[in-house]
Amino acid sequence: MKPFERRKYPYGIQVFSTIRRENYLYVDKTEYVYRMTHADNKYMFLNRPRRFGKSLLTDTLQCYFEGKKELFTGLAIEKLETEWTDYPVLHFDMSLGKHMDKDA
């Protein structure tokens, strides 16, 4: 990949693996993912407004915890992480139930 290569803007795409594999523009914030996962905090609250990347962040965390090192090639976390361990990840998609009635 060339440094100033034109890339598509990932409008509406919240899947980290799709963004990385299909060469979409990605602003590297994986250093913060590393800091979050290696901090001594007991709890962490992430407060972001609508359309500010919450789904992309959680998908990035999922890929990180599943040990998908190949997706992080060339990103900051690649230099920071020494052990790419595969952890089990539970994924709950709350968007599927927002149009359901109480009987469903």
Image (cartoon, grey):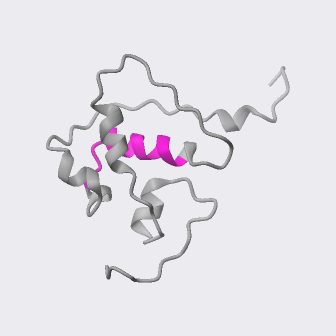
| Relative vertical location of residue 93 with respect to residue 101 in this rendering, above or below | below
Residue at image position (20%, 42%) is 84
Q: Residue at x 43, y 72 (%)?
A: 23
Seen from the viewer's position, the closer of residues 100 and 40 is 40
What's the magenta bit mostly, secondary-structure-wise?
A: helix
Question: Who is closer to the viewer here, 38 or 90?
Answer: 38
Q: Quadrant of residue 40?
A: top left
Image mark count: 0
Q: Is residue 21 above or below residue 17?
A: below
Which stretch appears magenta? 56-69
In the picture, measured across the screen, residue 76 lies left or right of residue 20, that is left
The relative height of residue 85 versus residue 5 in the rendered view (above or below) is: above
Q: In the rendered view, tell whether residue 7 sits above or below residue 25.
A: below
User: For residue 66: magenta?
Assistant: yes
In which quadrant is the N terminus drawn? bottom left
Compared across the picture, whether 73 is left or right of 20 comes to left
Q: Quadrant of the C terminus?
A: top right
Task: Please tell me which residue lies in front, 12 or 80.
Answer: 80
Residue 26, percent from left and from top: 45, 63
> Residue 101 location in percent, x, y?
85, 26
Q: Position of residue 42 (x, y in %)?
A: 37, 16
Taking 77 as reference, is 99 left or right?
right
Going 51% across and 26% down the picture, which residue do you hit? 45
Q: Is residue 63 magenta?
A: yes
Across and down, in percent, residue 60 comes to 42, 47
Tell whether 55 sits left or right of 76.
Answer: right
Determine the image quadrant of residue 12: bottom right
Query: Which residue, as the protein is rendered here, is positioned at the far top?
Result: 42
